[in-house]
Image (spheres, rainbow, N blue to C red):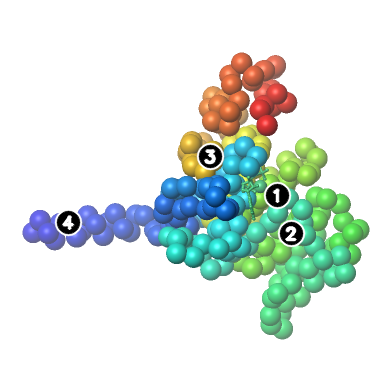
Amino acid sequence: MDAARGFLIADVAHAARPAPAVRLRDFERRFGNTTIIEGLDLEIAPGEFVALLGRSGSGKTTLLRTLAGMDDARGQDVTVPSARAVVFQDARLLPWKKVWRNVALGLRGADIRQRAEQALREVGLGHRLNAWPLTLSGGEAQRVALARALVREPQLLLLDEPFAALDALTRIRMHDLVLALWRNHRPAVMMVTHDVDEAIALADRVLVLDSGRIVAEERITAERGDRTVLARGLRETLLRHLGVERGEIAEEAGVVHLARARA
Ligand SMILES: Nc1ncnc2c1ncn2[C@@H]1O[C@H](COP(=O)(O)OP(=O)(O)OP(=O)(O)O)[C@@H](O)[C@H]1O
Ligand SMILES: [Mg+2]
């Protein structure tokens, strides 16, 4: 009876918690004698949006490259879905291929143009299918990069500072776009960013990487678009973990200036 009940509880627990999309156990990455990441445990649930903060050189891109399968993780306990896509800070479009061909790159089948077209329409670029990449603005190029990621229907979408090179207004528009795409397609997302506010605005969970370990983890349950109330305290917590002392956070009329944040 007890055993049966035990099974039942185990089953219920199992049913309530789907297998993670990403799972790393005791992950380590060295370059020569230098250990960049050590003893790192990470799980990302299917459809979860995780933001990864960390000082320059803390290993964020190294971790992202591992999840993307772009780095050697042989012999390590790393589980990632097979359908993955990456967007970097620069769009990395091939200038000699038209926009739709950049999106369709590597796809096979008779319908690749239709699929590329559909993805480009989703990012608001249905009218630039035949444009050359060099005629696009920075924001448009990043939207093409998002379309190229989307068309692969990734279960895991990896974003490495995707909006860092864009002006503030375009960046806000991109936030809305990325949330809309995420809601429509529901991939698990890991987004690397230096922008604490961006992390708070977009993510379900914010992680801070430092010296190869996750030193802070904040889950945000507040609705997106309704996060300004909690942002101040959470922002200070995250900035502290990024090595910015409280006295360095100068606030004026609710604005946090990061100019003096330590490099
Ligand atoms: N292929 C490599 N060979 C040697 N060292 C490397 C290699 N790739 C990364 N590193 C080192 O590993 C450390 C972490 O690099 P990584 O690019 O992951 O940092 P990051 O957190 O993404 O930094 P940033 O915020 O500046 O992009 C750095 O010190 C970097 O020099
Ligand atoms: Mg990086």
Does the image show residue 152?
Answer: yes
Q: In this view, does 243 lie to the left or right of 149?
A: left
Seen as rendered, the residue at the extreme left is: 1
Mark in the foreground, 1 or 4? 1
Q: Residue at x 27, y 56 (%)?
A: 12
Query: In this rendering, is residue 204 above or below 44?
Result: above
Crowding at dot 1, Cα within 10 Å, few <14 / some 14-19 / many 20+, comes out as many
Q: Label 4 amino acid?
A: Gly
In terms of sequence position, does the residue under pointer 2 or pointer 4 come before the other?
A: 4
In terms of sequence position, does the residue under pointer 3 or pointer 4 come before the other?
A: 4
User: Which mark, residue 145?
Assistant: 2
Name the residue tied to disc 1. Answer: 162
Residue 99 quadrant:
bottom right
Secondary element at image label 2: helix
Image quarter (top left, top right, bottom left or bottom right) of the N terminus? bottom left
Q: In this view, does 75 lie to the left or right of 49?
A: left
Name the residue tied to disc 4. Answer: 6
Seen as rendered, the residue at the extreme right is: 135
Does the image show residue 201?
Answer: no
Q: Label 1 amino acid?
A: Pro
Q: Residue at x 61, y 66 (%)?
A: 153
Name the residue tied to disc 3. Answer: 211
**Residue contact at pointers 3 and 1, CB within 8 angstroms:** no
